[in-house]
Amino acid sequence: MEKTDANKAFKCSESLIQNICKVFIGKRDVVMNAVLALLSEGHILLEDVPGVGKTLLAKAIAKSIDGSLKRIQFTADLLPTDVSGVTIFLQKTGEFSFRKGPVFSNILLGDEINRATPRTQSSLLEAMEEYQVTVDGSVYELEKPFLVIATQNPIELEGTYPLPFSQMDRFIVRLNIGYLDHEIEKQMLKDQKLQVSIDKIEPVINCSELVQIQEMIRHISIAEELYDYIVTIVQKTRNYDSIAFGVSPRGALDLMRFSQASAFINGRDYVLPDDIKHSAPVVLGHRVIVRKGTRLTASNNIDMIKEIVDGINVPV
């Protein structure tokens, strides 16, 4: 990549993070991981209690990239066609016409995704993986960038359907936001006393520039031993005592992409072992199924991945 182009792209990504942090205050680490997911062409699962800013984060990302945002409130009676779109018959012309669903957007916010039936949840699988949807035998391409931000409430489980493992595997990260500390929450009250914070931010990058940066990140250099390092981490999850099913090859690809984005955010055109080591718990934690009898929590999964990574020699 040209040095001037790389420098410009790096400044754009840093401006993106800072812009989102203007409204999503006190959680720079969450913003950082969300932006890394965006740059990695991945999707985000936000799992936390109501009211901590999950929707705000999605809106801030969409406004910062000057992209379109569509929101779906997932419920038990939601149909797959409510997501992807439907073919209708026009009596005046005697022809069929496809009416696009909300999936045709740059940012798709799926609120409380686990309240929809597995049939409806599965309507997102093709879009998340192949950037297209198939309706009545016709294939419709999605415009890039395309990012799914799905939320789910881990407390209220009545009337919910656990996400299929195949769908969990399509999210590059699962993020927990958490509560704000005293001073940050006090500042939030002052900031939003007269005006909603999201109204204050402007785009710092457009969708075309973002796609160029995503393509640039794909060319970040990875040394041969670091490919081995990624594969060793992934294969170790498949032979870990507490894990019944380890990370898939898709997880290895996502770890590579996320590590490339991490290197890029840090102003490098090459990946370091630390990029992989720090990315692994975030990218792989939700991709493993623990054995029966092991307490299943997001933090336990992340701790397992950290333990696995710590037990592997780091390439020098």
Image (tube, rainbow, N blue to C red):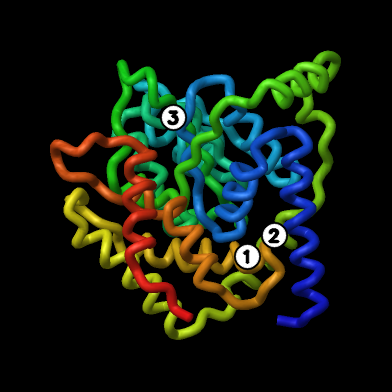
Q: Which-is-in-front pick, marks 2 and 3?
A: 3
Q: CA distance from mark 1 to mark 3?
A: 27 Å
Q: Nearer the viewer, residue 245 or 142?
A: 245
- Residue at the limit of the structure toward the left, as seen here: 292
Q: Residue at x 41, y 44 (%)?
A: 124
Q: Position of residue 141 (x, y in %)?
A: 52, 57
- Is 61 placed left or right of 200 in the picture? left
Query: Vertically, is 162 above or below 270?
Result: above
**Location of mark 2 (residue):** 210
Disc 1 + disc 2, Cβ < 8 Å: yes
- Is 87 placed left or right of 8 in the picture? left
Looking at the rendered structure, the kind of residue marked 1 is Gln
- Is 3 placed left or right of 160 in the picture? right
Q: Residues within 10 Å of mark 3 (few under 14, many from 20)?
A: many
Q: Nearer the viewer, residue 55 or 185?
A: 185
How many marks do you count on the picture? 3
- Res 133 seen here: no
Q: Earlier in the sequence, mark 2 or mark 3?
A: 3
Looking at the rendered structure, the kind of residue marked 2 is Leu
- Residue at the limit of the structure toward the bottom, as seen here: 224
Q: Quadrant of residue 247?
A: bottom left
- Res 195 seen here: yes
Q: Earlier in the sequence, mark 1 or mark 3?
A: 3
Disc 2 + disc 3, Cβ < 8 Å: no
> Which numbered marker is on residue 214?
1
Q: Position of residue 73 (x, y in %)?
A: 49, 25
Q: Residues within 10 Å of mark 1 (few under 14, many from 20)?
A: some
Q: Position of residue 47 (x, y in %)?
A: 46, 33
